Amino acid sequence: MTITGITKPGLSAMAILVAILWGCFISERLTVQRANLEMERVLRQIRRPVPVSLPQPSALQPRPAQS
């Protein structure tokens, strides 16, 4: 005669919760992987050399030095 035991509904609930937990682990892993790929893409885009235009003549005239 057993005093305690795992019933079929209890075992089913544990199986469902373990499946949900594994789903969370996999989802978290995929989210981090996607974030890392996006970060790499953005960093590559930021570091890409951009041609600099030639300096434009200034509209302001330089002030003469005061003595």
Image: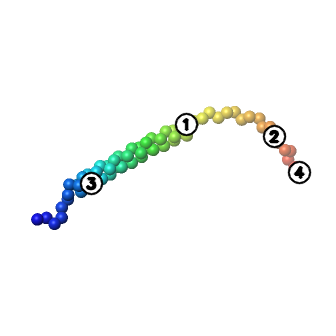
Query: Splitting the image into 4 quarters, where does residue 52 fall?
Result: top right
| Distance between the alpha carbons at the discs numbered 2 and 3 | 77 Å
Looking at the picture, does residue 19 appear above or below residue 54?
below
Q: Nearer the viewer, mark 2 or mark 3?
A: 3
Residue 7 vs residue 38: left or right? left
| Distance between the alpha carbons at the discs numbered 1 and 4 | 47 Å
Q: Amino acid at mark 3?
A: Ala
| Distance between the alpha carbons at the discs numbered 2 and 1 | 33 Å
Residue 28 vs residue 66: left or right? left
Which residue corresponds to mark 3?
13
Between discs 3 and 1, the one toward the N terminus: 3
Element assignment for label 1: loop
Q: Amino acid at mark 1?
A: Arg
Which residue corresponds to mark 4?
67
Q: Amino acid at mark 4?
A: Ser
Residue sticking out furthest to the bottom = 3
Q: Residues within 10 Å of mark 4 (few under 14, many from 20)?
A: few
Which residue corresponds to mark 1?
48
Element assignment for label 4: loop
The residue nearer to you, when weighing 25 against 44, is 25
The residue nearer to you, when weighing 27 against 62, is 27
Element assignment for label 2: loop
